[in-house]
């Protein structure tokens, strides 16, 4: 019997893979927090200089993010942060509401005591972050939701939910610019965390789905806000 073994990975090769992963994470984070806005063009040369690499790993990172739908590559034009139409965006939020609600349902059944304590502390950090502004709240909010995803103990559900959130992350963060939304969001986190920690799976599911979903009555001002911010930042 012949045993086929792979060649050992060189330190240089591992460094290349690491740099690619770092670029992917950095670009993904910038898209999620709105630093790179929908429709914004990505300058490969500038990105390569920023990360201190050749353009090859930058192109590879862009390709990987394009496969996730976060970046759109246009032949003979360049690479752009993906945009989503209003109708498609509304559908994404409905999907997110369903997936995140399901995460809360299973987290309420499966989180242990230590995880529950971490979730309550995360809710407290979200409330504290409201005083620091949108960018700080976005980071605290992401950590809160990630704890719930992990609490499901279901890798497939975590993967699907994170993919949906990544796809609309840059748009989702616009909701935090709506008047009073930061405080309401933080307060809703406490209600969600309480239901998860007491094992009330159905109520946790309902509260998190409502927390994530954008109601039709809120959608018009939400789209108007996106257009207003985009014009101001051009």
Image (tube, grey):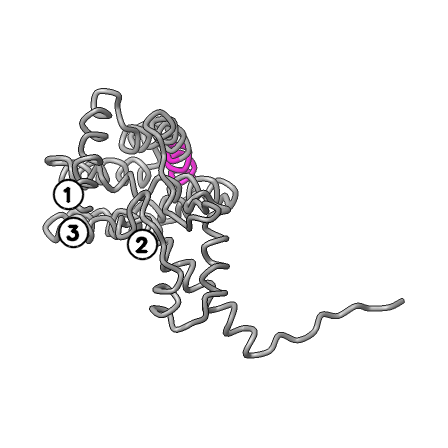
Q: Mark 3: give few (<14), some (14-19) or many (20+) Cα within 10 Å.
A: many
| Residue 69 seen in this snapshot | yes
The answer to whether 29 appears left or right of 232 in the picture is right
- Please provide percent x and percent y for residue 87: 35, 24
State how far apart marks 3 and 1 are (Cα): 25 Å
Is the stretch drawn in magenta largely helix, strand or loop? helix
The answer to which of marks 3 and 1 sits earlier in the sequence is 3
Q: Which mark is residue 211?
A: none
The answer to which of marks 2 and 1 sits earlier in the sequence is 2
Q: Are marks 3 and 1 in contact (CB under 8 Å)?
A: no
Residue 35: in magenta span: no
Magenta stretch bounds: 100-109
Give the quarter of the image for residue 95. top left
The answer to which of marks 2 and 3 sits earlier in the sequence is 2
Q: Nearer the viewer, mark 3 or mark 1?
A: 1
Residue 106: in magenta span: yes
Q: Are marks 2 and 3 in contact (CB under 8 Å)?
A: no
* Residue annotated with mark 3: 129
The single residue placed furthest to the front in the displayed view is 76
* Residue annotated with mark 1: 232
* Residue annotated with mark 2: 30
């Amino acid at each position: 019997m012949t045993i086929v073994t792979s060649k050992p990975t060189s330190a240089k090769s591992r460094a290349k893979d690491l740099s690619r992963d770092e670029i992917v994470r950095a670009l993904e984070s910038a898209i999620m927090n709105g630093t790179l806005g929908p429709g914004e063009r990505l300058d490969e040369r500038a990105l390569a200089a920023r990360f201190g690499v050749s353009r090859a790993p930058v192109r590879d990172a862009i390709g990987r993010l394009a496969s996730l739908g976060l970046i759109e590559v246009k032949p003979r034009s360049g690479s752009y942060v993906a945009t989503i139409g209003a109708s498609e965006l509304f559908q994404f939020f409905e999907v997110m509401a369903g997936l995140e609600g399901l995460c809360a349902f299973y987290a309420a059944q499966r989180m242990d005591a230590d995880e529950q304590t971490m979730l309550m502390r995360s809710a407290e950090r979200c409330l504290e972050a409201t005083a620091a502004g949108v960018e700080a709240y976005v980071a605290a909010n992401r950590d809160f939701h990630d704890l719930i995803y992990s609490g499901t103990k279901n890798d497939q559900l975590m993967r699907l939910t994170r993919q949906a959130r990544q796809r609309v992350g840059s748009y989702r963060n616009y909701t935090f610019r709506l008047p009073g939304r930061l405080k309401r969001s933080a307060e809703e986190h406490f209600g969600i965390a309480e239901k998860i920690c007491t094992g009330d799976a159905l109520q946790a599911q309902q509260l998190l789905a409502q927390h994530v979903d954008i109601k039709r009555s809120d959608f018009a001002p939400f789209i108007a806000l996106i257009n207003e911010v985009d014009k101001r930042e051009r």
